[in-house]
Image: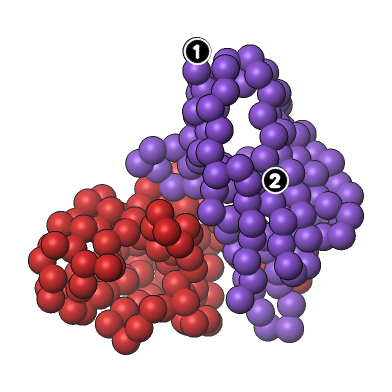
Amino acid sequence: DAGVIQSPRHEVTEMGQEVTLRCKPISGHDYLFWYRQTMMRGLELLIYFNNNVPIDDSGMPEDRFSAKMPNASFSTLKIQPSEPRDSAVYFCASSSRSSGTTYNEQFFGPGTRLTVL
Amino acid sequence: GQQLNQSPQSMFIQEGEDVSMNCTSSSIFNTWLWYKQEPGEGPVLLIALYKAGELTSNGRLTAQFGITRKDSFLNISASIPSDVGIYFCAGFYSGAGSYQLTFGKGTKLSVIP
């Protein structure tokens, strides 16, 4: 299995530009998570999907951020317009269905390092 | 929201030494997790703890789920250079329609050969 695939691995853009990050989860996983990692705030959950439906987007910082999952094998995180404070590493993770209160391991992708100038 | 306090923030140790790090929370979790992140990669799960008081080992790693369900520690014995990385604790809670995985800020481990 190829694991969670993210693209691009690095993105450098200028303030005000639109940025789109992409994720392909592990086949068969029905949960998908987007995280942001910064030195100051650590790893933060932005949004997660179950069966392609957004369940909790309370971690999305503001309206400039949006995420979609048009099918079980693809998700995007878009920032429009981007700002320097959005610079961070963005991770996508996927997991199989949790049963009750049991945690099912989340498998993380390698991340996209975003720099907004 | 829930917050995890992870300590220490960083450690420099000699190869062969034992390492200990811990996490505390103001809230109860169903599950405690320990992840390791290497440069340029995403976090990888090392150990998952499912019951209060549980003590689990994975090779040279040992972790415990605190009795109060609000804390956990991770020990690494006889450290080696490949142990270098950032170690994260995470608390998982699921119930009443809620699914939460909260991460600590991480402990950066450096091993001096």
Q: Separation of disc 1 and disc 2 at Cα?
A: 24 Å
Please state, as top left, top right, bottom left or bottom right, where the N terminus of chain B lies in the image: bottom right
**Precedes in sequence: disc 1 or disc 2:** 2
Foreground residue, A99 or A40? A40
Helix, strand or loop for disc 2: strand
The residue at the point 86 percent across, 47 percent down is B54
Q: Is residue B23 above or below residue B46?
A: below
Q: Is residue A99 above or below residue A9?
A: below
What residue did someone put label 1 on?
Answer: B113
Give the chain letter for purple.
B
Quadrant in the rendering for residue A36: bottom left
The residue at the point 28 percent across, 53 percent down is A113
Q: Amino acid at mark 2?
A: Asn
Chain of the residue where label 1 is placed in the rendered structure:
B
Where does the image place residue A7, in percent across and percent down from the top left? 26, 56
Chain of the residue where label 2 is placed in the rendered structure:
B
Q: Colour of chain A?
A: red
